Image: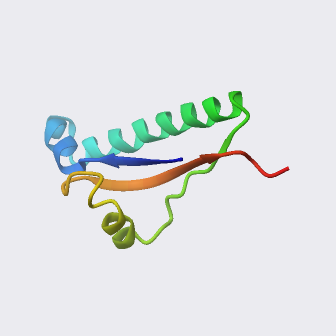
């Protein structure tokens, strides 16, 4: 199983524009970090493993996700979940 994280950064920036430029994008990254932390904890509790894959080619990442998320969304990364090697 692989979890795909996505966010509409433009909509988030628009929603938080009164708080300053790019504030919405920063909130998206903060929330993604909290979500990833909980996924790591859940995986460990269930004897599974995961790793955040975020340093992938952004264009390829977007192309691969085009049928999964709206075009306005950015894909910050993936979290594959599985059994760790011994």
Q: Residue at x 15, y 36 (%)?
A: 15
Indicate the quadrant where residue 14 lies: top left
**Residue found 30% across the figure and 55% down from its top:** 74
State the scheme by which the image is colored: rainbow
User: How many numbered discs?
Assistant: 0
Q: Nearer the viewer, residue 36 or 65?
A: 65
x, y percentage for residue 29?
39, 44
> With 33 as the anchor, is 74 left or right in this view?
left
Instruction: Give the x, y percent position of residue 71.
Output: 19, 57
Residue 38: image quadrant is top right
Looking at the picture, does residue 58 appear above or below residue 14? below
Q: In the shown orientation, is residue 73 left or right of residue 56? A: left
Residue shown at 34%/72% (left/top)?
A: 59
Q: Which x, y percent locates residue 20?
A: 21, 42
| Residue sitting at x 38%, y 72% | 60
In the image: residue 30, left or right of residue 38: left
Q: Nearer the viewer, residue 7 or 44?
A: 44
Residue 56 at x, y percent in the picture: 48, 67
């Amino acid at each position: 199983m692989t979890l795909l994280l996505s966010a509409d950064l433009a909509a988030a920036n628009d929603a938080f524009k009164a708080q300053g430029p790019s504030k919405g994008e920063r909130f998206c990254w903060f929330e993604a970090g909290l979500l990833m932390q909980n996924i790591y904890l859940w995986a460990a509790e269930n004897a599974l493993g995961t790793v955040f894959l975020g340093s992938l080619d952004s264009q390829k990442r977007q192309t691969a996700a085009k049928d999964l998320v709206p075009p306005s969304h950015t894909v910050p990364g993936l979290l594959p979940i599985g059994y760790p090697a011994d």
